[in-house]
Amino acid sequence: MLGHCAREEEVTKLMRSGCWTEAWEPELREHVTSCNLCMQTVVLKSALQTALVQSKAEARLEAPGVLWWRAQLRRRNAAIEQLNRPLARAQRFALLINLLAVVALLASQWRHVSRLTAWLLQVADAPIFHPGILWATAAQQPGWNLIVLILCGTTVVILCGITVYLATE
């Protein structure tokens, strides 16, 4: 509503000084309740003061040292993450190569499964297990060299273990 009230400036000064409407003179309170312009001024100033108090309470700034420390921490974490990306890709690639080597090894030796089970049963029936027995019986197997198979399998298992360890670290 456009217009001007003679007491609007007085109401504004009292509101600005922080004096609440309950502390005003009874005559001024009656005027505010009857004058629409003064009532709007009181409502608007009260809302703005409340919003100012709330925003000051919410916007507590931390110490500059804490802000600097957090910024340094974020920058360091971003740099570490950027450096770890190629390493993680290399680890995944190494794991894939190891898995493919295991699959290729198993596929190449699949036809020898029956002989391998017979050999394992022969080794298990030995009264005392000794690595010399393992090598001697492996050398007697025709058509394939079990020593190479064991060495390849051991290498693949070790490389898989290292890759998994590095990937989960």
Image (tube, rainbow, N blue to C red):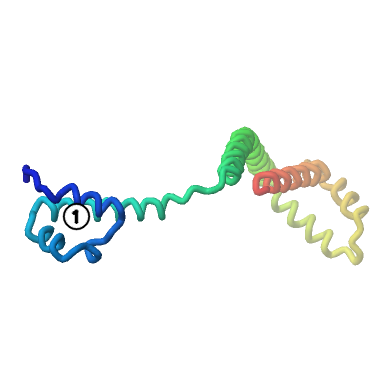
The crowding category of the residue bearing disc 1, from other C-alpha atoms within 10 Å (few below 14, some 14 to 19, many at least 20), is: many
Of residues 31 and 85, the one drawn nearer to the viewer in this rendering: 31
Say above or below: 115 vs 28.
above
Tell me if I can see residue 125 in this picture.
Answer: yes
Q: Quadrant of residue 167?
A: top right
x, y (%) of residue 47?
24, 54
Of residues 162 and 144, the one drawn nearer to the viewer in this rendering: 162
Which residue occupies 65% across, 48% down? 168
Which residue occupies 81% across, 43% down? 151
Say above or below: 155 vs 125.
above
Q: Is residue 73 left or right of residue 151?
A: left
What residue sits right under mark 1 in the picture?
42
Say above or below: 86 vs 135.
above
- Element under disc 1: helix
Which residue occupies 8% across, 54% down? 36
x, y (%) of residue 123?
84, 59
Tell me if I can see residue 93 in this picture.
Answer: no
x, y (%) of residue 93?
62, 36
Which residue occupies 73% across, 45% down? 162
Q: Is residue 40 left or right of residue 144?
A: left
| Kind of residue at disc 1 | Val
Q: Is residue 116 left or right of residue 57?
A: right
x, y (%) of residue 157?
73, 47
